[in-house]
Amino acid sequence: MISVDVSRRQGQFLVSAAFESDGGILALFGPSGSGKSSIIRLIAGLDRPDRGRIVLGGVVVADTDQRIFLPAHRRRVGVVFQESLLFPHLTVLANLRYGRHFTPRAERRIAEEPVIDTLGIGHLLQRHPATLSGGERQRVAIGRALLASPRLLLMDEPLASLDWDRRQEILPLIERLRDEFAIPILYVSHAVEEVARLASEVAVMEQGRIVRLGPARQVLHTGIGDSPDRFQITSVLEGRLGEPDKVYGLTPVEHPSGRLWLSGLIGPVGRTVHVVVRGVDVSLATERPRRLSIRTVLAAHIVDLVVTDGPTALAETELKDGTRLMVSLTRQAVDELALAVGRDVFVLIKSVAVDQRPI
Amino acid sequence: MLALSHDAWLAIGLSFKVSLVATLAALPVATLFALILARGNFPGKALFDGIIHLPLVLPPVVTGYALLLLMGRKGVIGAFLDRTFGIVFAFRWTGAALAAAVMAMPIIVRAIRLSIEAVDRRLEQASGTLGAGPVVTFFLVTLPLSLPGILVGGTLGFAKALGEFGATITFVSNIPGETRTIASAIYTASQSPDGDAEALILSGIAVAIGLGALIVSELMARWFRRSAT
């Protein structure tokens, strides 16, 4: 569907990236200044590549060899910017309908009502952008981009300017867009939690180039040696959502090694989710613990163990589906439990640690 | 009411007509110039900017004389317009409007240019990603958002056009009922032995109109600033 292979020099900074995506959400992930937004601008047609080729849904929108360059307004690529950029002189409804006028009738495949319903902005239609809250503005911006029925939706840090509550409100909406409107999305973010939750594929960018590319579960996993900071060590588990426990406000994620509990009611049942787990939020037990406050207990075995001269150690465990889960622990614990490579263990994850907090 | 001669009333009416036509004709041209100056990047931009602002610094007589040379019946452009379209500016009220428009141009361009420069270019880019081409984007986004500058510029330009004297009298002379505006009428009255009273009253009217326009434009600017936040 999307095929990108471009480079562009901006001053001293060279941005160069090549990737492909077959739909779903591909995330460009990396620290700010790594060139993610530059890639977005190249794909949207707001900047010209120095070299390269961009193909969207079979249409070559840029090719430096063939001297093809379609300007932004002829690409039909929707963009959701970090700062919404709603037209301040138009009502919400006029903003939402803006792109429709320029979409050929035959290509208007996304209807107004389901988008307005999904985004929950029906009560805002007659308001002006200046009177909206940040979260409302961003929802309208998403709707505006969608209603132009784009070939591809680019989202450039759409949640970065929002507070935590607003992010929690919009993240599930983006998941629903992905599922209900079957639109390929390129999602730019520096928040691992957003990327893990939304993306099926992840491209990690550093200093203008893609350093890792692949399924979210593999790419977001930070193994031994990837980071010196134990708070940065994370793993990604993939599982399916189960029936939420409404009484306690918990949602189970079914995993071959056991059941993970997430705080909050998340749906729909059966959907595949990615859960980011920090190494410091995981404990190990050599036998299945009883009478313990920790709700999530997964069976695993140790595949690698790094014991330093200092107080800390790092264990890499493998779950039944082959997922690697990193555990940060003390050297004392390694010795007292006689942990060693190959040993069967139980991995304990505090449910309150794996809700959808940004990490 | 005031003891004004028929000629004086004629001059007041003519001044309003000339200034209104001058302003309305100048606005689209000024908007285009302002857009070129705000968004264009081309060699000779400083020169282009200078030429537009020239009437602000030249003696008005020079501007009027230049108009006479260019747009007069025997002028390069004037002769062509006369031959092909039968349009004549020399010694007509339309010529007075042209002179007023040229003199008001720098003020109007300046106000609109500031307004266009204040429009967030990323809004135009957002419009592009939604499928709108550059021309449509200008009319749907840039122009409406520049409206404060256009209205303020128009009001100031109207006031400036009402006060125009030097270029007008040089270009189209001082013909009662045709090209004698308030300013020319004051000049005429002040030159005649018994015209002091009339010159004074007309001057008072000129002050009132000019001040009124300035206050209106300031109030508008303030109102736009407030509604923008």
Image (cartoon, rainbow, N blue to C red):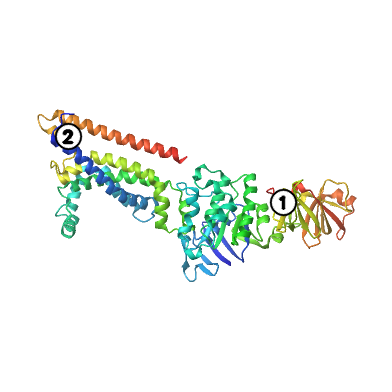
Q: Nearer the viewer, mark 2 or mark 1?
A: 2
Q: From the viewer's perspective, tell me whether residue A218 is left or right of residue B211.
A: right
Q: How crowded is mark 2: few (under 14 residues within 10 Å), some or many (20 or more)?
A: many
Q: Position of residue A71 (x, y in %)?
A: 46, 62
Residue found at the far bottom of this picture: A66
Name which residue type carries label 1: Gln
- Residue B212: numbered disc: none
Quarter occupied by residue A189? bottom right
Picture layout, residue A184 above or below residue B15 = below
Labels 2 & 1 near each other (Cβ < 8 A): no
Q: Mark 2 lies on which chain?
A: B
Q: Where is residue B58 in the image (x, y as percent from the top left)?
A: 24, 44
- Which kind of residue does numbered mark 2 sit on? Ile
Q: Name the residue under label 1.
A: A232
Displayed quadrant of residue A213: bottom right
Dot 1 crowding, Cα within 10 Å, few <14, some 14–19, many 20+: some
Task: Let me know if marks 2 and 1 both belong to one chain.
Answer: no
Secondary element at image label 1? helix
- Observer-nearest of A345 and A113: A113
Instruction: Provide the secondary structure element on which disc 2 rests.
Output: helix
Q: Position of residue B10 (x, y in %)?
A: 16, 38
The residue wearing badge 2 is: B186
Where is residue B133? Give x, y as percent. Answer: 43, 59
